[in-house]
Image (cartoon, grey):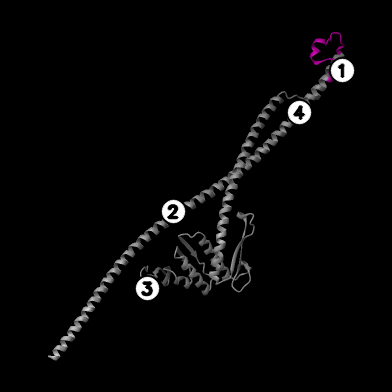
Amino acid sequence: MARWTEKSRALEARTLALGDGIDGARRETEARTEEARTCRERRAACLNEVEALTRLAREREKTVAELAERTECARQRVREMAEQLDADDRVVRELRAAHEERREELEHHRLRENEIRLRIETLLEEVRRDHGLELDQVEVEDDVAGADPAQLEAEIADLRTRIERLGNVNHAALDELGQVEEKLAFMRREEADLVAADQQLRETITRIDEICTARFTETFTKVKEHFHVTFRKLFGGGRAEIFLEDPEDVLWSGIEIRVRPPGKELRNMALLSGGERSLTTVALLFSIYLTKPPPFCLLDEVDAALDEANNVRMCEMLKEFARDGQFLVITHARPTMTIADALYGVTMPEAGVSRHVSVRFADIEAGRVVGLN
């Protein structure tokens, strides 16, 4: 009886322990169920967020495309206006040359007219002096009935000689003068129109230059700030600045880059080593990227001249940027390949036979490799 009693107690204790285990399993099951429900809600929220971000990215791509198209249209308009301005300048020069020719021709006709009038007055004065006659009184007062024929012949010969010396008289000079004056007035009106068009084009170009100057100055200031930050991250310290060689003429000014790597003096880009120049160029490229981050970026062999330590620092910065955008990197450097989400390349397993290979690291971590072509 004692043994059976002890055995009964042991069974009861075991029953109680199993009951506690069942209760714990039930509570754990409920907790797992609640956790699964929470995960499903979080997954739905994430999907909604991904969809919203996708729509936002599409809208931004559309906006970027529209801005690019508007920029290209503005550039085309500027080129057309510049070509039109050149054509107008040529027309103005041609009109001015023609105007100068007509002015010289008009002056020549005026001189010719004055010369003819002077000759007529000279002849009238000679008639008055030699014969005491006025031209309008010759037919009335000239009486040659009793004159000597030989004398008359001599006078006639003398008059003919004088007439020959006078030469031909252009009776159409006044009509030609009127035509030249009309043509001159027309050319002056054309010149006024061309001058007004030239002024309008110059005002338009001035407005475009002002807008471009303001936008470039704003962007240049932002790039300058970001360049100092990216340079210090990539070099682990130091200082970097960019300057305009001619601040008074922003649109045509050159840009000077001055950097001071850690432990070195401030110097120009031309005095740096090849690796330092490449890393400085990467820092400037990333500073431009930070000024107006695009949704997609393509980098082609930017790490070709970097050593392993500088390449690692560049990869760390690239991983930070990849959180907000997508990067397609063409590279042969292993450190850069290790941070990628996917690799696409060409291999030659057999001589003369090339194969395209694509690998996703997430699939490798999950124990599967897909995408081999």
Q: Residue furthest bottom?
A: 2
Which residue corresponds to mark 4? 112
**Amino acid type at mark 3:** Glu
Q: Which of pointers 1 and 2 indicates the residue nearer the eye?
A: 2
Quarter of the figure with residue 109: top right
Which residue corresponds to mark 1? 130
Q: Secondary structure at mark 3?
A: helix
Q: Secondary structure at mark 2?
A: helix
Tell me which numbered mark, 2 or 3, is placed earlier along the sequence: 2
Q: Which residues are magenta?
A: 125-149
Which residue corresponds to mark 3? 365
Q: Secondary structure at mark 1?
A: helix
Q: Which of pointers 4 and 2 indicates the residue nearer the eye?
A: 2
Query: Is 268 rendered above or below residue 67?
Result: below
**Amino acid type at mark 2:** Lys
Query: Is 27 rendered above or below residue 190?
Result: below
Tell me which numbered mark, 1 or 2, is placed earlier along the sequence: 2
Using the numbered discs, state the Cα–Cα distance from disc 2 to disc 3 in whole angstroms.
Answer: 36 Å
Q: Residue at x 27, y 69 (%)?
A: 33
Q: Residue at x 62, y 39 (%)?
A: 196
Using the numbered discs, state the Cα–Cα distance from disc 4 to disc 2 in whole angstroms.
Answer: 73 Å
> What mark, if any, has residue 62 been given in the picture?
2
Using the numbered discs, state the Cα–Cα distance from disc 4 to disc 3 in whole angstroms.
Answer: 104 Å
Q: Is residue 226 left or right of residue 245?
A: left
